[in-house]
Image (cartoon, rainbow, N blue to C red):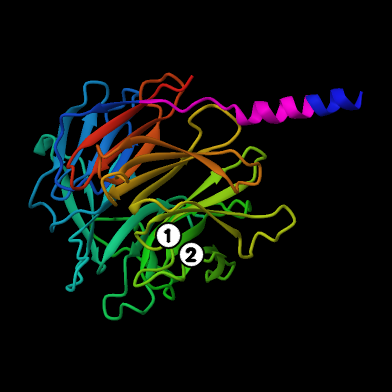
Amino acid sequence: MRYTAILLIVMFLAGISRSAELAFEGEQLDTELGVGYAVRLIDMNDDDKLDICIVDQKRVLWLENPSWTEHEILSEGQTSADNVAFAPADINGDGQLDFALAAGWGGGKTPRGTIQWITSNKANGEHWDVHPIRIEPTTHRIRFANILGDDRPELIVAPLFNPTNRDGGVRLIALEIPEKPTAQDWPVHLIDNSLPVMHNFLPIDFTGNGQTDIITASYEGVHLHERQEDGTWSKTQLGSGDQDSAPSRGASEVKVGKLADGSRYIATIEPWHGNKVVVYTKDKDQPLRSLWKRHVLDDQLRWGHAVWCANLDDDADEELIIGVRDDANDSTRRGLRLFDPIAADGSRFERTVIDPGAVAIEDLAVADLNDDGKADIVAVGRQTHNVKIYWNKTQ
């Protein structure tokens, strides 16, 4: 009886470890980019198919599913070069999709940064109209999320660094859509101004109270930002970041994934624009608002630049998807890497290199593009100037 019980336990554990082998088939699209700064998968023409929307260095375009015909909605010269991030929402309340767009990206010694919103205008053919919102130097990431609990989302804006003091805090703000977005100033709500060199953030109901929180990745690591009843924001550190590296430190990307038992992990690239894939996990009896345990999954990359969490093999957990922007050497290439959780506590993941070298991945997005029930991956390149779909063939 004891032998049978042990055998059943061994068979059960073996079944957990034998998850489906991740398999993807790449398709290079014809579109050529300058720098594919950002990509989202959105139904642009109401045909119930997800299209590929890209913010390129000097234009904004979308590729129509399934022919991948290119449609340019913003051409060179309509915004200050160069475009860096965008966020979809119905901004003017007409029932049609609009984009907020961050442009005039100034990552160098002369901080620049414009925020505008663009909307379709049939009189202009496929090209959309541009409406300025404000100037916010070094704006790097933007995303809509309802953080005020009203009936419209706010535009969350994260600059990369403090324009006057690199060691000073970044002005993380929320812009409220006014009743007349083309004619009125967008009210500004300050979320935080204490964290230096922020690279990305994630709006998410992290605490489970029905309110949208914000997770940030900065030189100081990973932080949870929560809105209080009086409208102020609290800040709690969840991840230490890599504080031993120099000159860059901390973390630069952040996403939240799910483990098989339903608990969560936080995924980052460390240090800022760094060489490590890192996840943070919390022990079951550990308080949510505390420093989570740090696990380095991979330290063989150069300039990790895209992070996503999604279920790619229809099991109980979510895989970690990493885009690498640069080659470390001839044998350690840029491209696409996947990490599948193989330990119940999230301390170990199995790495699969899907495509070494083909795309210098600046950004990626994940969704089911061909309605086969499997999540596919779209990556856009920097030095490679390309767009590639990775079709999910996992059995």
Q: Is residue 360 left or right of residue 321?
A: left
User: Which quarter of the picture shows residue 98?
Assistant: top left
Residue 21: assigned label: none
- The relative height of residue 283 versus residue 226 in the rendered view (above or below) is above
Residue placed at 16% from the left, 47% from the top? Answer: 129
* Left or right: 358 as drawn, with respect to 376: left
Residue 94 seen in the current view: no
Relative to residue 395, is residue 288 drawn left or right? right
Q: Earlier in the sequence, mark 1 or mark 2?
A: 2
Residue occupied by mark 1? 270
Visible residue check, residue 280: yes
SS at mark 2 in the image: loop
Q: Residues within 10 Å of mark 2 (few under 14, many from 20)?
A: many
Number of numbered tags placed on the structure image? 2
Q: Residue furthest left?
A: 77
Q: Which mark is residue 241?
A: 2
Residue at the extreme right of the image, as rendered: 1
The front one of 102 and 300 is: 300
Residue at image position (21%, 26%) is 68
On-image quarter of the N terminus? top right
Q: Which stretch is magenta? A: 8-24
Q: Is residue 236 left or right of residue 45?
A: right
Q: CA separation, marks 1 and 2?
A: 6 Å
| Magenta run includes residue 21 | yes
Do tag 1 and tag 2 residues touch (Cβ < 8 Å)? yes
Q: Amino acid at mark 1?
A: Glu
Residue 115: image quadrant is bottom left
In front of the other: 16 or 46: 16
User: Mark 2 belongs to which amino acid?
Assistant: Gly
The residue nearer to you, when weighing 394 against 367, is: 394
